[in-house]
Image (tube, rainbow, N blue to C red):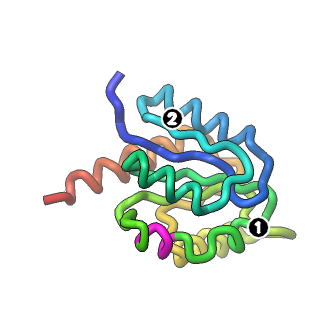
Amino acid sequence: MENLGCVITGTVGVDAHVIGTKIVSRALREAGFKVVELGAQTPPEEFIMAAQETAADAMMISSLYGMAEMDLEGFRDKCTEAGLEDVLLYVGGILGVSRRDFPADEAKFKRMGFDRVYPPETDVRTAIDDLKADLSRKRAERP
C-alpha cells in the first residue's frame, strides 16, 4: 500500500480519553498513512518532537476533557520555532467545558493556527478525506 504521509496522533495535556485517537490512528493506517501514535496524556512538546523526528506531514490531536484551548495555546508558534511551519494541524473533540458553540470554537482554534477543527461527532472518514485533500493541495503548491 502506498504511504500517503506521516501523521502524529494522540490526546493532549492530561486527557486520558484515548479510544477516539486509537480509532483515528487505525483508520489512518488503513487509508495508507504512516502513523506515530503517542497515546494519552501527551504534552504538546512531545507532539512537536515526534513530528521533527519523523518529518511528519500532519498532527491530529484529540481532546475530550475540555481543556484543549489551554493545552494548545501558542502551539502553532512552537511548531514554527521548531521548523515545522508546514505541518498540518488538526484538532477535534470536546474542546472546551460547559455548553459549547462549535462555530465559535472552530474560529478560535483556526485563529490559533489549526488547519482543521472537528466536533466530537465527526466521522473519521471526513477527517481523512480532508487530510488527503490538504496534503494534495500542499504538494501541488510546492515549487
In which quadrant of the rendered image does the N terminus lie?
top left
Question: Can you identify the residue that label 1 sits on?
Answer: 67
Residue drawn at the location 46% of the way across and 67% of the way down: 79
| Quadrant of residue 143 within the rendered picture | bottom left
Q: Is residue 107 above or below residue 133?
A: below
Q: Residue 40 at x, y = what percent?
A: 72, 47
Secondary structure beneath label 1: loop
Between 20 and 129, the one lying in front of the other is 20
Classify 10 Å Cα crowding around label 1: few (below 14), some (14-19), many (20 and above): some
Residue drawn at the location 42% of the way across and 29% of the way down: 32
Q: Residue furthest right?
A: 98
Q: What is the three-letter code of the residue carrying label 2?
A: Leu
Position of 21 with respect to 96 (left or right) is: left
Q: Is residue 78 magenta?
A: yes
Question: Which of the two labelled residues, at mark 1 and mark 2, occupies the earlier sequence position?
Answer: 2
Residue drawn at the location 62% of the way across and 44% of the way down: 38
The numbered dot on residue 129 is none
Kindly check if marks 1 and 2 are in contact, taking CB atoms under 8 A apart as contact: no
Q: Residue 120 at x, y = what percent?
A: 71, 52
Classify 10 Å Cα crowding around label 2: few (below 14), some (14-19), many (20 and above): many
| Quadrant of residue 82 within the rendered picture | bottom left
Q: What is the three-letter code of the residue carrying label 1?
A: Met
Give the magenta range.
Answer: 76-80
Position of 142 with respect to 106 (left or right) is: left
Between 26 and 125, the one lying in front of the other is 26
Residue drawn at the location 78% of the way across and 46% of the way down: 17
Distance (Cα) linking label 1 and label 2: 25 Å
Q: Look at the magenta stretch and give its main secondary structure.
A: helix
Question: Can you identify the residue that label 2 sits on?
Answer: 28
Q: Is residue 74 above or below residue 20?
A: below
Q: Residue furthest top?
A: 1
Q: Is residue 77 magenta?
A: yes
